[in-house]
Image (spheres, rainbow, N blue to C red):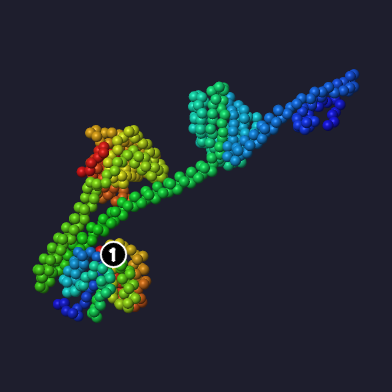
């Protein structure tokens, strides 16, 4: 059962089919998902005090994944991020890992 | 001026006449002896003013001429190229070749022997032809000067029909600086061409990558939907409604993937409203020039057999360029380091089509593969994407033509395509 205190997965991806399909997958394991087409929309959201994580596309129109991560760090928001990308960019992954503050929750890289 | 008793005198001096006019006079005196004893001088005085002024004028003219030659790095000469006699070789002419003519009995051989061995045969042929026809010539060649420096010279020769067979008057100009500048420009142009080529080749790869990405998105979503569908059906209390939604989501995503592919195909199939007249021969020459380096690197010799007065085709210039570039690159790769010959022909074919063929002497195509090679993603190359020939065929067909391959009876393969004259898209 999904309740107001159950964990939330935030999904930021500009592809609607991908957003919806990920939401469905999460629903099968009783996780609720909130969907955003643009990074800006997610950043304006007040994140409730429940366990949560962010599924973030690396390449987004407007603000890219790395920039979102930077903004979250600046705002002191500690949320684990799962990056999804069709491009295997290890230099990018390293840059992302290095900009992460010490002791903050981990980073998972997944290719779609 | 005093004279030895036994010698005569011959002097030219200036005198001032009573009316104040200055004249040049030449005094010639002969000593007269009687019984071995000097008696007197018999002499004569000639007014040489006119000659003297003329001589001075000539000297001045010659100095101006020499100055002009030195300023323009142009030397003059006169010579019989058959008998190898030199009648005249100006100071600048000698300076261009870098030697002191006075020290050599036959300056003609000296000039001729300094010509670089690799330039000599072509130059000799040109000169021989000109001499035989009694025609003027204008040639460029390189010499190795006495100091070892290589210089580019341009020789212009004029034959006066009133003169002996083989007699020429001409000038030699040092064009080394201009040539070096030309070489530099040529190097830059080649560099630009190489870059343009790299861009084109990369474009194919990038197109393939972008396409793969576009298609992968809905496929990933379809897989996720199908996974979700199974998830809703599995477990203690299957959620049929959600499973249904996920299943239709799968269908939607798969359709989207198919639509993307259709769209890409239609990009190549559809007739573009902007057809421009294309001179296919010019296109062939252009691409040959562009691929010069690839051919040199792979020891490939190109031969163009292009029909004159070929009608233009109406088409997409860039697309047709891609077809030619693709076929030629394939041919070059097939002949990798094999001293191959690449032959490109163009001629008017049947029923108002032009026929263009690209033949190589490379590894050839097995008989059972001549159609398969046009399948997208079929490739025999380690680095190839296999989309080149498929796209090429699509482009040619969209122009209303056909593209096919045959194996040569001897060696290699021939790719031929037709394009309708002033062609209409399908």
> Is the residue B23 above or below the residue B315 in the image?
above
Q: Quadrant of the C terminus of chain B?
A: top left
Q: Residues within 10 Å of mark 1 (few under 14, many from 20)?
A: few
Q: Position of residue B46 (x, y in %)?
A: 76, 25
Q: Which residue is mark 1?
A: A61
Residue B231 appears in view: yes
Q: Is residue B41 above or below residue A71?
A: above
Residue B332 falls in which quadrant of the image? top left
Q: Residue at x 26, y 56 (%)?
A: B212
Point 32% across, 77% down: residue: A75
Secondary element at tag 1: loop
Q: Residue furthest top?
A: B35
Which of these two is toward me, B72 or B355? B72
Horizontal placement of B232 versus B335: left or right?
left
Q: Give me the residue at 11% from left, 73% from top.
A: B236
Chain for disc number 1: A
| Viewer-proximal residue among B55 and B410 | B55
Q: Which residue appears at 32% of the width and 33% of the height?
A: B309
Dividing the picture into quarters, in which one does residue A92 lie? bottom left
* Residue B15 visible within the image: no
> Which residue is more in the foreground, B357 or B60?
B60
Q: Where's residue B164, x and y in %?
A: 57, 22
- Residue B196 is situated, as x and y percent measured from the top left of the image, at 37, 49
User: Which x, y percent locates residue A41?
Assistant: 25, 71
Where B174 sits versus A85, above or below?
above
The part of the image, by quadrant, that contains residue B296 is: top left
Position of A109 with respect to B296 (left or right) is: left
- Residue located farthest toward the front when viewing the structure as drawn: B19
């Amino acid at each position: 059962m999904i309740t107001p205190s159950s964990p939330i997965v935030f999904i930021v991806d500009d592809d609607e089919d991908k957003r919806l399909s990920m939401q469905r997958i999460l629903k099968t394991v009783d996780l609720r998902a909130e969907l955003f087409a643009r990074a800006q929309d997610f950043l304006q959201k007040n994140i409730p005090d429940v366990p949560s994580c962010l599924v973030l596309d690396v390449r987004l129109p407007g603000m890219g994944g790395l920039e979102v991560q930077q903004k979250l760090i600046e705002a002191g928001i500690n949320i684990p991020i799962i990056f999804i990308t069709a491009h295997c960019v290890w230099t990018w992954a390293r840059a992302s890992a290095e900009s992460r503050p010490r002791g903050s929750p981990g980073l998972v890289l997944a290719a779609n | 001026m005093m004279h030895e008793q036994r010698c005569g005198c011959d002097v030219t001096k200036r005198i001032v006449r009573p009316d104040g006019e200055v004249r040049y006079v030449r005094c010639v005196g002969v000593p007269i002896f009687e019984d071995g004893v000097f008696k007197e001088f018999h002499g004569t005085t000639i007014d040489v003013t006119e000659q003297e002024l003329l001589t001075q004028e000539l000297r001045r003219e010659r100095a101006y001429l020499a100055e002009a030659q030195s300023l323009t790095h142009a030397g003059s000469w006169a010579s019989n190229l058959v008998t190898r006699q030199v009648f005249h070789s100006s100071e600048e002419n000698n300076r261009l070749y870098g030697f002191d003519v006075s020290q050599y009995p036959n300056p003609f051989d000296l000039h001729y022997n300094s010509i670089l061995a690799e330039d000599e045969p072509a130059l000799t042929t040109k000169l021989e032809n000109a001499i035989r026809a009694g025609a003027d010539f204008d040639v460029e060649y390189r010499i190795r000067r006495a100091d070892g420096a290589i210089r580019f010279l341009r020789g212009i020769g004029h034959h006066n029909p009133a003169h002996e067979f083989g007699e020429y008057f001409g000038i030699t100009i040092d064009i080394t600086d201009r040539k070096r500048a030309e070489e530099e420009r040529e190097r830059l142009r080649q560099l630009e061409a190489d870059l343009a080529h790299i861009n084109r080749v990369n474009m194919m790869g990038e197109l393939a990558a972008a396409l793969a990405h576009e298609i992968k998105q809905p496929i990933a979503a379809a897989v996720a939907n199908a996974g979700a569908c199974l998830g809703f059906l599995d477990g203690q209390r299957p959620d049929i409604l959600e499973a249904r939604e996920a299943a239709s989501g799968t269908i939607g995503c798969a359709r989207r993937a198919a639509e993307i592919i259709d769209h890409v195909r239609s990009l190549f199939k559809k007739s573009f409203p902007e057809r421009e007249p294309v001179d296919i021969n010019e296109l062939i020459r252009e691409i040959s020039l562009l691929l010069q380096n690839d051919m040199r690197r792979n020891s490939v010799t190109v031969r163009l057999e292009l029909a004159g007065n070929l009608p233009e085709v109406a088409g997409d210039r860039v697309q047709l360029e891609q077809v030619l570039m693709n076929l030629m690159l394939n041919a070059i790769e097939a002949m990798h380091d094999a001293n191959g010959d690449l032959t490109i022909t163009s001629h008017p074919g049947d029923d108002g089509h032009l026929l263009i063929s690209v033949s190589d002497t490379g590894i050839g195509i097995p008989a059972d593969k001549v159609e398969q090679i046009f399948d997208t993603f079929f490739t025999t190359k380690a680095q190839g994407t296999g989309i080149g020939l498929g796209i090429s065929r699509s482009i040619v067909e969209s122009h209303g033509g056909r593209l096919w391959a045959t194996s040569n009876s001897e060696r290699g393969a021939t790719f031929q395509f037709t394009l309708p004259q002033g062609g209409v898209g399908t």
